[in-house]
Amino acid sequence: MKKRTLYAWGVSVLCFVVLMIVTPAIPQSEEYHDFADKREYLGIPNTLNVVSNFPFLVIGLMGLILCFYGNYFKLSLQGEVWGWTCFFIGVAAVAIGSSYYHIKPNDARLVWDRLPMTVAFTSIFAIFIIERIDEKKGTLSLIPLLVAGIISILYWRFFDDLRPYGLVQFIPCIAIPLMAILLPPMYTHSTYWLWAAGFYLIAKVEEAEDKPIYKLTHHIVSGHTLKHLCAAMVPVFLALMLAKRSIETERQSLLKTWKISWMKIKENGVNVESYTCTYENVPVVESNG
């Protein structure tokens, strides 16, 4: 491992330690488990919050199958295969863990809701490092990132402190869209990353506005149910990206692409054809009346 990589890991660990020292602990609020929609159908408590996890199972299993069946996604790098496998396993497991939690919401069950999500977050971050920075570094980072995510869950459970788990969620949410815009992609269709990030952002807003949305829809659907459906669109867009993409022959960042497009629009606006009109004197013929 190169010195630069060691320095990067060292700085990351140092920043984490400093953050843990200077910031107060963030305990899990009991109000978090008080969801708006508590209706029960067919003997299933909190029915809509439970069954709305089903799309995760479908897309997770489909993604796993397409990763290996005839190499439909055309994954050429070993690190990519491992990373996307972990991601789709995490997505499928979200359906099981989240359903288990929502049947009877409490801290003990919340562990099984957050654990598969953490696997998905950390594996997708490793995939991004493979695609945008360095294949070897990204592949080597997969296991440490997964371990860091699992430790953040255990730390919260045993010490009632959400700070490490918050970082595991927060850093990929900020880093991935920035990397998607600033770093040149290995493959085409990289805008799908931004679509996925956008749906995840909407899901987080719906989660925060669980009760207001439930009231706004006249108790038809809650924000948390919509959050599940919106979050499920993230793996949908990433699976579509995998199916459509090909090797990018001319690697340039989305930011550079947008700049070039903007310059062309400006040039087309300036280079408007100008027309000149000339007027001639028309002689007036007098009639002899």
Image (cartoon, grey):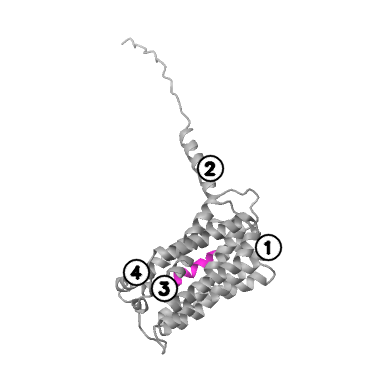
Question: Considering only order in the chain, which callout, 3 or 4, is on the residue closer to the N terminus?
Answer: 3
Q: Which residue is mark 1?
A: 77
Between tags 4 and 2, which lies in front? 4
Q: Which mark is residue 161?
A: 3
User: Which contiguous range is marked in magenta?
Assistant: 228-237
Question: Considering only order in the chain, which callout, 3 or 2, is on the residue closer to the N terminus?
Answer: 3
For this view, does 277 lie left or right of residue 128?
left
Instruction: Please provide percent x and percent y for residue 235.
Output: 53, 68
| The quadrant where residue 186 appears | bottom right
Q: Which residue is mark 4?
A: 209
Which corner quadrant holds the N terminus?
bottom right
Instruction: Please provide percent x and percent y for residue 284.
Output: 36, 13
3D distance between C-alphas at marks 2 and 1: 31 Å
Question: Considering only order in the chain, which callout, 1 or 4, is on the residue closer to the N terminus?
Answer: 1
Q: Which residue is mark 2?
A: 260
Instruction: Please provide percent x and percent y for residue 246.
Output: 64, 57
Residue type marked 3: Asp
- Name the residue rendered at 49%, 72% in the picture: 152
Question: Considering only order in the chain, which callout, 1 or 2, is on the residue closer to the N terminus?
Answer: 1
Residue type marked 2: Ile
For this view, does 77 lie left or right of residue 108?
right
Disc 3 crowd rating (10 Å Cα; few below 14, some 14-19, many 20+) is some
3D distance between C-alphas at marks 4 and 3: 23 Å
**Residue 278 lies in the magenta stretch:** no
The image shows residue 29, relative to residue 234, as above or below, that is below
- Name the residue rendered at 52%, 60% in the picture: 12
The image shows residue 27, relative to residue 177, as above or below, that is below
